[in-house]
Image (cartoon, rainbow, N blue to C red):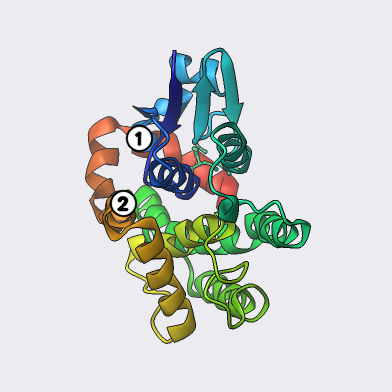
Amino acid sequence: MGLELYLDLLSQPCRSVYIFAKANSIQFDFKKVALAEGQQYGEEFGKINLLRKVPAMKDGDFTLAESIAILLYLCRKYQTPDHWYPEDPIKRARVDEYLSWQHSAMRAHAAKMFWFRLMIPVITGEDVPKPKMDSAMEDLNNTLQLFEDKFLQDHPFIVGDEISLADVVAIVEIMQPLGSGLDVFEGRPKVAAWRDRVRNKIGPKLFDEAHNDILNARNLPDTFEKNGMLDFLKPKIHKLFN
Ligand SMILES: N[C@@H](CCC(=O)N[C@@H](CS)C(=O)NCC(=O)O)C(=O)O
């Protein structure tokens, strides 16, 4: 059995794995796990990833969770071009530095805006209180500024002249708030120019295809309604955000 990737392209880490595999012509079977239908809680998916998160991977008998682990596995197994995860120890350390930082910084703050502006109002029927929203926006703005000052600086890509895994992992997270109508690139020409370079390197067609679902996320309320997911999700949301 060949490589299987369990994905929902509404999810940022799924998009990074999808983009990386496609950009490197890695053949895989796309196994859709529809998060809005709760498929991550099904019996079948539990056998693939007990953490019940996407992305997940199955390669023969080997199963793997966590996007970063999957990206690194694909890099090694398919011996993708060096620039993605350079052999040079200093360049590699720069990729690692970004991959380590992003979990609790860019990922956390960009995703929170998406949840606050779209998902929570849809699921609970209530807007997030303004002080909470303002504080989340401040966190995201500070994080984007740090991204510019510390990681992007004045080079074309995070690690210098060439695209790496760090850029792919960064862009998918930074695109997430757009799904809630928040254009984080407005007023940030440096980040916008970097986004354009990443899109061009990956290939605009692949980039746009990977982001199609998230940019149409405002259709999600209908999907939740149809699948009876609202009642299921409400207590989860209260646990997460109260
Ligand atoms: N650290 C994990 C995060 C995975 C994750 O949080 N996936 C979310 C989608 S972005 C998910 O599957 N959520 C389903 C749920 O929590 O029910 C990774 O990088 O793969």
Q: Does any atom of ligand 1 lie closer than 8 Å to the CB of label 2?
A: no
- Residue at image point 37% right, 48% down: 123
Measured along the vertical axis of the image, is residue 180 above or below residue 70? Answer: below
Q: Is residue 40 above or below residue 76?
A: above
Q: Amino acid at mark 1?
A: Met
- Give the answer, above or below, for where 62 lies relative to 161: above
Total marks in image:
2
Q: Residues within 10 Å of mark 1 (few under 14, many from 20)?
A: some
The circle drawn on residue 102 is none
Residue 114 visible from this viewpoint: yes
- Per the image, label 1 sits on a secondary structure element best described as helix
Classify mark 2: helix, strand or loop. Answer: helix
Q: Quadrant of residue 28?
A: top left
Q: Which residue is mark 1?
A: 229
Q: Which mark is residue 206?
A: 2
Three-letter code, disc 2: Leu
